[in-house]
Amino acid sequence: MTVPTHSNALNIAVTQDAMASFSKASDPRLAHVMSLLVKHLHAFVNESQLSKAEWLKGLEFLTAAAKITDDERNEFSLFSDIMGISSMVDVVSQPPGGTPSSVLGPFHNHDSHLQPNGSDLTHGQPGERVWLHGRVLDVHQNAIPNAQIDFWQNADNGLYPAQDAAQDPQNLRCKINCDANGGFSLLTIRPHPYTVPTDGPVGALLAASNRGIWRPAHFHIIVSAPGYVGLVTELFPAGSDYLDNDTVFGVRPGLIVDVKNCDNSEVAVQYGLTAPFKEVEFDFSLVKQA
Ligand SMILES: [Fe+2]
């Protein structure tokens, strides 16, 4: 099929003038990024032969996104997620060689409390117990001392504390300082798939596009260590629904983890579990800062 275009002198001039209009920006990176953005947006308008009605509809979408956005809820961030932009930024900004990164998502809380390594985060709540442990290593498999993990996930009802007033705001989240061998360990529950918010314009777009609204079950983890590039990532239990059609495109092959049976009696006693219980073991690999 031949794509209709109006690649005449007039629209080429409009694109060139709009790109050049950013050339005097005091920050050269701003000049470069905005010029490229104009170039590709103009190409999109040209290739799609966007009508005035469609352009207006786009503006109405952005206006509705602004109206529903507040301190707790960012529809633009969700729009970025479901367009795959957030994942693309993850992919292009992560240096090669280490554990793959994945999306941060909307429920990270900078104020998670520091808990002792080996903590039990379950505190009697419902959910299948999972012993999550592993090490933080460099790309040569050497232990990184003084690493820290920042962990969060949803509860057995599929909700994060920010969505569920019945939960303690610190529920199923913590920071842990790893040991001298990079080791970390905690007891949590099996996370559950959940839907992205559907009550705003992004939800309407997903419905109109006959797209899924679900994310597969996942643990969120940020791994940091002095001298290494920080890692924002997720671990996806194998066998979860929606691994093949995550609506925010966050699943990477290297981040799918087996939930195994474990009969370690020492760990069973430590957490008051009956063996066999569930275990996820994962070693993170960080890239040294340039
Ligand atoms: Fe999440």
Image (spheres, rainbow, N blue to C red):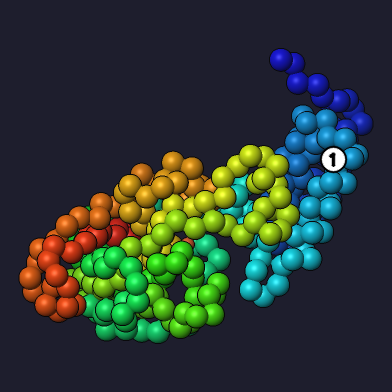
- The quadrant in which residue 191 appears is bottom left
The quadrant of the image that shows the C terminus is: bottom left
In the rendered image of this protein, does residue 247 appear above or below residue 219?
above
Query: Is residue 47 visible to us here?
Result: yes
Image quadrant of residue 16?
Answer: top right
Label 1 sits on a secondary structure element that is helix
Q: In the image, 52: left or right of 192?
A: right
Residue that mark 1 sits on: 54
Residue in the foreground of this view, choosing between 204 and 224: 204
Residue at 49% x, 47% y is: 246
Question: What residue appears at the point 79 percent right and 59 percent down from the top-left corner?
Answer: 64
The x, y position of residue 277, in whole percent, is 18, 64
For this rendering, which residue is in front, 109 or 4?
A: 109
What residue is at 54 percent from the left and 56 percent from the top?
195
Percent x, y for residue 162?
Answer: 54, 75
Q: Where is residue 71 in the image (x, y as percent from the top left)?
A: 67, 75
Q: Looking at the picture, does residue 7 appear above or below residue 90?
A: above
**Residue at the outermost top position:** 1
